[in-house]
Amino acid sequence: MAHPTPSPATPLDIVIFGGVGDLSVRKLLPALYMAHLHNNLPEQTQIIALGRQSWDRAAFLHFIQEKVRGFIESKAYSDQAWASFVRRLSYACVDATDPADFHEIKAQMQPGSERVYYLATAPSLFVGICANLSGAGLVDERSRVVLEKPLGHDLASARQINHEVGQYFEEHQVFRIDHYLGKETVQNLMVLRFGNSIFEPLWRGPQIKSVQITVAESVGVGNRAGFYDGTGAMRDMVQNHLLQLLCIVAMEPPVSLDPDAVRDEKLKVLRSLRPMTVADVARDTVRGQYSAGASDGEAAVAYLQEANIPASSSTETFVALKAHINNWRWANVPIFLRTGKRMAARQSEIVIEFADLPFTIFGDSAHQSVNRLMIRLQPEEHIQLQMMAKEPGSGMKLRPVSLNLDLQSAFTERRAEAYERLLIDVIKGRLTHFMRRDELEAAWAWVEPIIDGWQQLGEKPKAYTAGSWGPAASSALMAREGSSWVEES
Ligand code: BG6
């Protein structure tokens, strides 16, 4: 069932649990400011940030003025817009585990409002918050709840959270956010595939030789040691962002953009992923952890030397793996996924490598003939088709050149940040770019045996130098298939 489209005239209360936490300060409040600036919030929208600090309004506003402004693009900031934005804001000191405190939230709400509850907290609090909201009479059929990742720690905990949240909210009221689905280029990938006819006949094995998806970050663990060390790259990135990217690359054309039509197709991809045995895990996956090196021109300490990371930690900060999709379109096409922190560059890219020439008439210089479609998500957004061309001069010497589609210069319109776009979707009740329960569980079902396999194998993460492209084993994984990672030099 689709969510009824809310009326712009109805008052809206956006309640952020974890309202003064890291995510809220860095992403949610700046995104809401931008939505406000561009008149994308219903007129009577109120934003209620919840936290544990016993602040009055003035102290809260002082805090966010200090913290949030730095995350708003300077050209989008003006004192006037900020002043009108903060009129929408209020704060309540709430212990999310104490049902009595929920009456304070109720007291701050507008009469007859629609409610969006954004749970930017640890997942261990999700169920209690939903129960307390319901107990205080704050959930009705128009309410929506947004669940931040990670949703659970494994399949069983994800199922349990989904089940219990489902006691209070219908599935169509639950927005499981994966901010990669809000990125412009990721949404554009659907258009590239389903809004153009030229790629579809080629979009399959054996015309496609391999697919690689890299989400590389140059940053380290930062100030999230407590969270990250108990999570690791597999749960933090692969289970959600990378698998969601893979779904969009590999899905069949949906019958429409209806949320369930899209999510049904993504679910089929996840369910078609070939389960990994322990032997597959040993052969086809690489776990890494950064050692000291340099990043963005500065010395970088090893993961084990980062503040609040136990010196004996074996949490992975890097994963590379080879996956297979068991269906007609993708049988025998290796799919390489890779992500890591403290890598050589911030670079997120999907590379579709087309089949080798069956035969060449151009002699030796054609031996490196490769046609690749490269979809760069960040830092810049562009799509390149790598083709072979003749080098100028006598003779027939070949060299790769690119057809470039630079999305940033092709469109002059403002490009909203992922969180802004997704928050507007939540307000409008549009579920297409959010994960459905079965999708999330299917992703866990595939990832969990890999994590278990590492444990059974006693697989310690392999060291890689901060500022490199990961452990040597990651290149070896590719080389075994006659491929190599596409990396910025
Ligand atoms: C988050 C992860 O989901 O995504 C972080 O928890 C990671 O560890 C971040 O840094 C990356 O997002 P982006 O948009 O900067 O690529």
Image (tube, rainbow, N blue to C red):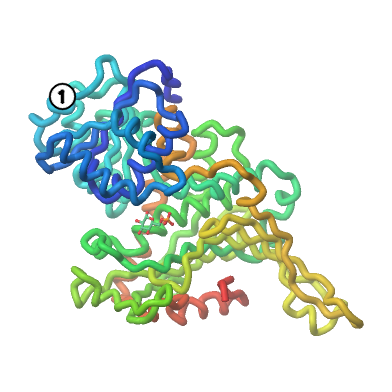
Residue 237 appears anywhere in the view: yes
Please determine whether, in this image, residue 4 is positioned above or below residue 297.
above
Please determine whether, in this image, residue 385 is positioned above or below residue 180.
below
Q: Secondary structure at mark 1?
A: loop
Residue in view at x 17 percent, y 36 percent: 58
Residue in view at x 60 percent, y 33 percent: 256
Residue 349 falls in which quadrant of the image?
bottom right
Categorize mark 1 by other alpha carbons within 10 Å: few (<14), some (14-19), many (20+): some
Residue in view at x 38 percent, y 77 percent: 298
Residue 158, percent from left and from top: 29, 47
Where does label 1 land, which residue?
136
Residue 356 falls in which quadrant of the image?
bottom right
Residue 123, percent from left and from top: 24, 47
Residue 54 falls in which quadrant of the image?
top left
Q: Quadrant of the N terminus?
A: top left
Residue 353, percent from left and from top: 66, 65
The answer to whether residue 443 is left or right of residue 227 is right
The answer to whether residue 105 is left or right of residue 170 is left
Residue in view at x 13 percent, y 27 percent: 104
Q: Residue furthest front?
A: 79
Is 293 in front, or is 25?
Answer: 25
Please determine whether, in this image, residue 313 is positioned above or below residue 242.
below
Residue 261, percent from left and from top: 54, 34
Please determine whether, in this image, residue 397 is positioned above or below residue 132.
below
Is 320 in front, or is 191?
Answer: 191
